[in-house]
Amino acid sequence: MSLHDIKRILLVLSGKGGVGKSSITTQLALTLSLQGHRVGVLDVDLTGPSIPRFFGIENAKIRQAPGGWIPVTVHENQDASSADGSGKSRGALYCMSLGFLLADRGDAVVWRGPKKTAMVRQFLTDVFWGDLDYLLIDTPPGTSDEHISLVETLLKSATPEQLAGAVVVTTPQAISISDVKKEINFCAKTGVRVLGVIENMAGFVCPNCSECTNVFSKGGGEVMATEFNVPFLGSVPIDPMFIRLIEEGQTPVYPEGTIIQGQNMDSNPAANGHLSTADDSLAQKYTKCSLFPIFTQMTGQLVSATLNPHT
Amino acid sequence: MAPSLEEPFENVSDALTSSLKKQPALVAPEPEHCPGPESQNAGQGDACAGCPNQAICASAPKGPDPDIPIITQRLAGIKHKILVLSGKGGVGKSTFTTMLAHAFASDPENVVGVMDTDICGPSIPKMMGVETETIHVTNTGWEPVWVSDNLGVMSVQFMLPNRDDAVIWRGPKKNGLIKQFLKDVEWGEMDYLVVDTPPGTSDEHLSVNSFLKESGVDGALLITTPQEVSLLDVRKEIDFCRKAGIRILGLVENMSGFVCPKCTHQSEIFRATTGGGRRLAEETKVPFLGAVPLDPRIGMSCDFGESFLDNFGESPACAALLEVVKGVQREIGVVVKEMKD
């Protein structure tokens, strides 16, 4: 049983595509790992897997072992006493995605429902995750085959304590909110607890003049969360530096005077106390990103929510 | 059982042709490695042993779906059919479909239809401002919802009892509805039918393709944003179109560049680190139809269900959009009369 040693399973859902499910999944995983948890990321978006790209492991391949698959390692466990000098422990981070199984990254996966169902089941039963604190499951948009199979299998083969619930991602626009409402209704119908709503792409801070523009308007996520009586975890602005980190692997740097959510970003590296470490892992670079403090706060809320299943 | 790595990746052509055939009525869900109830070796595959459907599948007639001629008949009066595709979600397929439809319909002589095949996340009704409408059924079929005199829309949203209801459907049920949209909707005489699709390369895409093959599709318009994360999925969609024999009318890059309203500094929110849509178009030898900048007012117009082209006709985004529309018309061979000023 591959889910046996996993403490908590979190789904990342959204009715709408392109709102940042994979981006949020990536950042939640990095943040949880930086807090010392052992994290696995499962990508069940079969026809458009993005997780390999986000973690910069597009060329990785899955290894096969008798009776299952071994997920791709992003980084291993690291103790506080280890050599990188950060003085912080970091949990291991593993990924599994259909992207790792494709011969060419441009190959289309043209599958109908039953095939997708079979694959989702296989992902849940045949991957050797080992001992994990959190398994984050990134999903495709919608409420169809992948989602039905995922929830069906999880309800059958995971205990209620393991299946912690779902994080629902939206952008602030009405057009996205109306699709995401459907997703919350899906959770209600299938009995999956909604741990909270995250509003992504809320505002864009101009790198030139640090003026914040609400490209996709603002505040819609919070209103929706109140309407459905589910927790609102926070708003995440668009940070071009995060995109740059993912696409080019550059450590985020901000122009002087950039203030995001009350925090002066240009002093961030100094405040963290370790400007130049030899460690150039994605997780280490991510600590310099303006979104890291936001996600630290959100994972804090999530962790305490999963510890108290009935509040 | 050890999972196999290669097995699932060879059946693209099977998947593409099988839905042209009629699916028999099944008594149980298909097993995991079902060869497809309408495929040639239905009832004879390894997975069929012990399946309650085996006898039904094996004895079902293997001919083409008898509904396809009906669909072809129904759509005979439509001059041009355009698919709007993208492997990635949220890049602006529905926004583009809406604006394309508005642009076509701005010529009062054109009659334009929009079909929304995104069953689980329909956006077209909201963007068109007809979210609260319902479908009228007449004795000749379903009547599309008319946004204006010459612009009709069909979407699953019109059939939901409550606006926020989730449509929790597996593939076959979605295919059934798409077939009904083509077979039972009274489209009538039309100049353009624009088909909006959900992200991905799955049931909806296969169905639309196989149902429309006979009646002829002009081609597909592919939408992307400039980042590699999106281009990656669009590459898959190009691969799909090539394998399925769908002509690609062109690639449009959406959300390219954002002009700060305060300092007018142009920044790239979704950075094109790998050359963006233009480069992908060159690489894959697909016509590049243009880049449309990110304008917050486009999103706002969509939220309010108004036409961006009518409201902000002077904006640079609008000019870029009209260029794309011209490009599409050029690709499908429509001669556009010059507008008199």
Image (cartoon, rainbow, N blue to C red):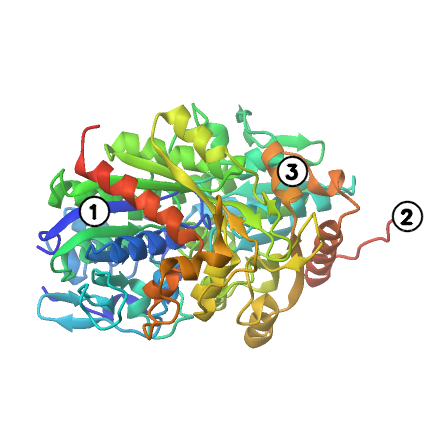
Q: Secondary structure at mark 3?
A: helix
User: Mark 1, residues whose alpha carbon is within 10 Å: few (<14), some, or many (≥20)?
Assistant: many
Chain under numbered label 1: A
Q: Secondary structure at mark 2?
A: loop
Q: Which residue is mark 3?
A: B301
Q: Which residue is mark 2?
A: B340
User: Mark 3, residues whose alpha carbon is within 10 Å: few (<14), some, or many (≥20)?
Assistant: many
Quarter holding the N terminus of chain B is bottom left
Res A53 → quadrant: bottom left
Is residue B186 in view? no
Q: Which of A251/A159 is in front?
A: A251
User: Mark 2, residues whose alpha carbon is within 10 Å: few (<14), some, or many (≥20)?
Assistant: few
Name the residue: 19% across, 61% down.
Answer: B45
Q: Amino acid at mark 3?
A: Ser
Q: Are marks 1 and 3 on the same chain?
A: no
Which callout, 1 or 2, points to the residue nearer the camera? 1
Residue A231 as seen in the image, left or right of residue A19? left
Q: Amino acid at mark 1?
A: Ile
Q: Are marks 3 and 2 on the same chain?
A: yes
Res B283 → quadrant: bottom right
Res B40 → quadrant: bottom left
Which callout, 1 or 3, points to the residue nearer the camera? 1
Residue A9, numbered label: 1
- Residue B60 image position (x, y, % from top left): 27, 50
| Disc 1 to disc 2, C-alpha distance | 62 Å
- Residue B4 image position (x, y, % from top left): 18, 68
Q: Note whether A181 is above or below B112 in the view shown.
A: above
Is residue B238 in view? yes
Chain under numbered label 3: B
